Amino acid sequence: MARKCRIDIVEMVHKAGAGHPGGSLSAIDLIVGLYGTGFRFKLDEPNWEDRDRFIMSKGHASPAVYSMLHNLGIISKKDIDGFRTLGSICQGHVDMKWTNGVDFSAGSLGMGLSFGLGCAIAAKMDNSERNIWVMIGDGETQEGQIWEAAMAADFHQTGNLNVIIDRNRIQNDDFMEVQMEIGDIGKKFESFGWKIIEIDGHSMTEIIEAIDVATNELERPCAIVAHTVKGKGVSFMENNPSFHGKAPNDDELILALEELS
Amino acid sequence: MSAPSKGGASRDGYGSALLKLADDPRVVVLEADLGKSTKSCLFRAEYPERTVSMGIAEQNMMLVSAGMASSGKIPFASTFAIFTERAFEQVRNGIARPGLVVHICGSHGGIHTGTDGSSAQSIEDLAIYRTIPNMTVMHPCDDLSAEELTLQLLNHNNPSYTRTARNKVSRIYDEDTVKKIKIGKGNVIKDGNDVAIIACGVMVNEAKIAAEQLSNYGIDACIVDMHTIKPLDGKLIQKLAKQCGCIVTVEDHSVIGGLGGSVAEFLSRNIPTPLEMVGVEDRFGESGGTSELMAHLNIDSKAIENAVKSVIKRK
C-alpha cells in the first residue's frame, strides 16, 4: 500500500508541476500505518460523525493524504490527477471544504494541533470514544501555537488526542540544524505532560505498535516522535532539502518510478 | 467573578445572551483569561462543564473553537477585541476559510475603553474582519441589542465577529423595540430628511445627542443604528441617500475600512452621495478619560454636528 501511495505521490506532483514530495514521502508510511490499523472510519460514509479524526497539520504534504484516500477508494484517480488544478477537489493544501475524508483545512503551519485539541475536547464532552490524530512536521514545532496547544492539552487531560511528529529534520529552506534545530522534541513534549513514544517512522512494525499504545493511553495525550527520512523511497530525493517543495522533472519521474516499481 | 456593570454596556448583553443560549446543548463558551471582562464569566459560573478555559493563548483558542465547531458544537469565543486581532490569520485560515461557524466576541473595542491606552484600543477590528469572505461583523450599541443580536447567532450559518464595548451608555432600545432588530438590517432610530447619520456601537448615542443639538439649527437628521457592518444593509443606505441627499458615518474606529469605509464603498459604486466620516483619523489612541479622549480624537457629538453641517453644504 505504501509503495502504491509513493508512486501516486511522485506522479501527482510531477503532473501538477508543483507540490511537496519530500514531506509526503517521509509521512506516508505513518499515514498508511494509521489508516490500516486502529483508525475508526467508514469507507462509505467519510463524514460519519463518530469517526476518528485525522488532522493533517503539515498540509503541504497533501499528496500523501490524497494518495491514501485514493487507495482506500474514497477519491478517484481522476481526482488525484487534478491535483492543484482549477476546480479540483485536490487543492494544493488539504482542505476539509473540498475533499471527502479530509478533517481539517491546513496550509498555515502550527494550527492543526489546536484544531485537534478542539475535536478532542468536544469528543470528551460527548462521551464519545473517538480518537483524534494530528500529524505535524518537526519544523512546524517552531510555531509557538504548537506549544500553546501542547500546554492546553495537558491541562484539559485529553487522553484521546495523539500527535504524530514527522521528524525528517528538513524544512523549506534547509536542514533544521541550519534554520533552527529544536533539539529533543520528545523531551519537550514530555515536559508539557505528554506521553512520548519514539519510533522509526518507516518501520511498519514500530508504527503499528506505537499507534496501539497511543490509542490505549487514555489518561494523557500522546506524542509519537517518528524519525523519518525526507523523500524516503526515491534515492535522489532522500534527505535532500531541494525536494521539499519541488516537482520532479520528466527524467526524474522516470528514475523515481523505476525505483518505486 | 465581578458583578455585571449596571445599565447598557454591550458586553453585559453578550454575557446575558450566553446564559439564555445555554438551553441549546451545542453551545460552548471559550475564554482566554478575560471572562470577567467579556462577561463570559456569567456562563462559566452556571455551566463550567461547557466552558473551555484556554489561558492567555488566543491563537490556540481560535483553532480549538474551529475544531469544536467541526465536531457539532456552536462555540462562542471571546477576549478583548485587540487580542482577537493577534489571531487574525487563525480566524481567516482556521475558521472562516473552511466555513466553520464560530462566533467571536471582541470586547473593550474602540478608544471608548479609555485609560488603558492605545495598546488596548482596537480601532481596526471591524475593518480587518470585514475583509474575510462570509464573515458577519457586528457592533451593537447597547446591552439590549447586544443580547438580541447574540441570541440570533444561534441560528446564524456563518462565522461572526461581534465587537462589544466596556462602558455603559444610555440605552437606545427598550425590551420591545429591540425585538425588531435583525442581523444584517440597519435600524432607523429616528427618521429625518436633511441628513442621514449612520452610526454603530457607542456612537449611536453620540449621534442621538448630536441630532438633538442639530434640531436647534433646524436640521432634521435621520439616525440609523448600523449594528451589522457586514453584510451591509445596502438597500437601506440607498434609500437614505435618496431621502436625505447626504450621509455622515459615525464610529469609534479608524476611518479606514470600518463602517465609514463600507458605506463609502457602497455609495461610490451605487449612488454617489456626499459623505463625511466621523471616526479616528489615521493614528493610534492614547490614555485618557473616555469623554476627553472622544473630544481629543474628534469623535464626540460636537464632531458629528460639524460633520453634518459640512456635508449638508455639499448637497
Image (cartoon, coloured by chain):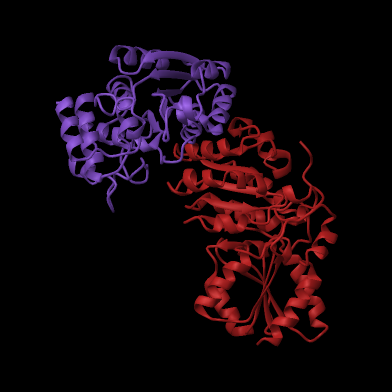
Image location (x, y in percent) of residue B40 = 67, 41
For the point 52% across and 33% down, which residue is it? A143
Out of B80 and B100, give the one closest to the viewer.
B80
Out of A93 and A231, give the one closest to the viewer.
A231
For the point 49% across and 40% down, which residue is it? B66
Residue B90, placed above or below residue B206: above
For the point 66% across and 39% down, which residue is it? B43
Which chain is rendered purple in the image? Answer: A
Image location (x, y in percent) of residue A137 = 42, 28
Judge left or right: residue A227 versus residue B213. Answer: left
Q: Name the image quarter holding residue A247.
A: top left
**Which tint was used for chain B?**
red
Out of B25 and A203, give the one closest to the viewer.
A203
The quadrant of the picture occupied by the C terminus of chain A is top left
Q: Name the image quarter holding residue B179.
A: bottom right
Residue B253, placed above or below residue B273: above
Q: Is residue A40 visible?
A: no
The quadrant of the picture occupied by the N terminus of chain A is top left
Q: Name the image quarter holding residue A157.
A: top right
Residue A11, placed above or below residue B265: above
Judge left or right: residue B9 versus residue A243. Answer: right
Q: Is residue A237 visible?
A: yes
Total number of numbered discs in the rendering: 0
Judge left or right: residue A19 versus residue A128. Answer: left
Image location (x, y in percent) of residue B159 = 51, 50
Image location (x, y in percent) of residue A133 = 41, 26
For the point 23% across and 30% down, which residue is it? A5
